[in-house]
Amino acid sequence: MSPSPARIRSTIANVVDQPDDLRDLRRIYKVLADVNRLRMLRTLADGPATVTQMVDAVGLSQPLVSWHLSKLREVGLVKARRQGRVTVHTIVPEAFDALRVREARALGLATAEPRGRHDA
């Protein structure tokens, strides 16, 4: 049985050199692509929260909330600190500013002239 055309295209795409800056962006985008994680970020935008508070806010199970928070921590969008027996999670606003800068640089928009503006 020979591989399908889609499988061949996928294999070729993975062999092509992929710049690290684009790989990093893809990793962050994948984390942000989950609606539950976006809901959790929106909750954390209102202030720090424990896992129990996040469970109440988003209606997911404790293990699932903990797993999603770990993904957000891995890419630096959320930080955690121990406070006694609980872990308090906080959004990292400057991480979003840094993401915008990285996006612009990686996509070649950092030095580009704004589009849609014409001098007469």
Image (cartoon, helix red, strand yellow):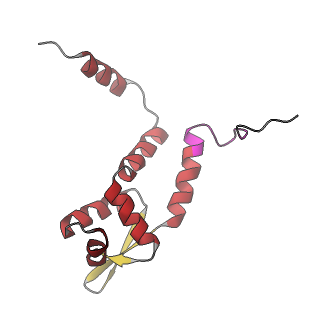
13 relative to 89, above or below: above
* Residue 105 is inside the magenta segment: yes
Image coordinates of residue 36 in percent, x first then y, are 32, 59
* Residue 100 is inside the magenta segment: no
Q: Residue furthest left?
A: 1
Looking at the magenta stretch, what is its main secondary structure?
loop
How many discs mark residues in the rendered view?
0
Quarter holding residue 104: top right
74 relative to 21, above or below: below
Q: What stretch is highlighted in magenta?
A: 104-114
Q: Residue furthest top?
A: 2
Image coordinates of residue 96 in percent, x first then y, are 52, 58
Image coordinates of residue 3 in percent, x first then y, are 19, 16
Quarter holding residue 108: top right
91 and 114: which one is in front?
114
Image coordinates of residue 106 in percent, x first then y, are 55, 40
118 and 112: which one is in front?
118
39 relative to 16, above or below: below
Q: In this view, does 18 lie to the left or right of 5?
A: right
Look at 50% across and 60% down and name the residue there: 95
Q: In this view, does 66 lie to the left or right of 94?
A: left
Quarter holding residue 42: bottom left
Look at 39% across and 59% down and name the residue there: 38
Look at 85% across and 36% down and name the residue there: 119
> Which quadrant of the figure contains the N terminus?
top left
12 and 52: which one is in front?
52
Q: Which residue lies furthest to the right in this view?
A: 120
> Which quadrant of the figure contains the C terminus?
top right
113 relative to 14, above or below: below
